[in-house]
Amino acid sequence: MATYRTILVGTDGSTSSLRAVSSAASLAAATGAGLILACAYSPMRERDRNAAADALGDLSYKVTGSTPADDALRAARERAVAAGARTIELAAEEGDAVDVLVSLAGRHGADLVVVGNRGLNSLAGRLLGSVPSGVSQRAGCDVLIVHTTSGR
């Protein structure tokens, strides 16, 4: 069995991605590896951001910058701690999910990237590619695709 020192897991805050976080955190706890929780985000168009800011008033900070990604990472950290991970780092970066995960894995010397399987069986995933297939093709390390789309 491979020995992992650094495990990177992608999350978007969805229930299925948090299942992948739990799996990655359990593996990190079992192997003593460090865990990097990663979330890619896209900036809102200025027109959309302004409309949301007008509607939200004092809560407009929730839709600007990386705030949604930061919220997803906070939820992921709670899940990772509950699963026993001890060394946890958070990374929110602007960009395409595959690009961000592959880049972070390289920069942090990750031995393993964990992603959920959501998107592998969708029509859009087959036509455009999906995060799991894109990461598995481009990452320079092991990739674990966790079955996250069932009710398990």
Image: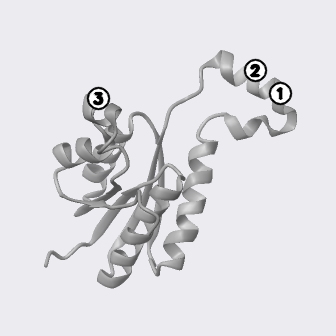
Considering the numbered disc 1 on the image, is that residue within a helix, a strand or a loop? Answer: helix
Q: Residue 101: which numbered mark, if any?
A: none
| Circles 1 and 3 in contact, beta carbons < 8 Å | no
Name the residue type under label 2. Ala
Q: Residue 128: which numbered mark, if any?
A: 3
Q: Where the C terminus falls, by quadrant?
A: bottom left
Name the residue type under label 3. Leu
Return the residue nearer the eye: 123 or 114: 123
- Relative to 121, 67 lies left or right: right
Tell me: residue 138, above or below residue 34.
above
Residue 27 placed where, x, y %?
33, 76
Which residue does the image show at 30% across and 56% down from the upper left?
108
Considering the numbered disc 3 on the image, is that residue within a helix, a strand or a loop? Answer: helix
Q: Nearer the viewer, mark 3 or mark 2?
A: 3
Q: Where the N terminus falls, by quadrant?
A: bottom left
- Relative to 98, 84 lies left or right: right
Determine which quarter of the picture holds residue 121.
top left
Q: Nearer the viewer, mark 1 or mark 3?
A: 3
- Relative to 59, 40 lies left or right: left
**In this figure, which colouring scheme has been used for the structure?**
one colour
| Circles 3 and 2 in contact, beta carbons < 8 Å | no
Return the residue nearer the eye: 121 or 84: 121
**Circle 1 residue:** 55
Residue 94 placed where, x, y %?
47, 36
Q: CA distance from mark 1 to mark 3?
A: 34 Å
Q: Residue 51: which numbered mark, if any?
A: 2
Which residue does the image show at 64% across and 43% down from the upper left?
67
Question: How many numbered circles does the render carry?
Answer: 3
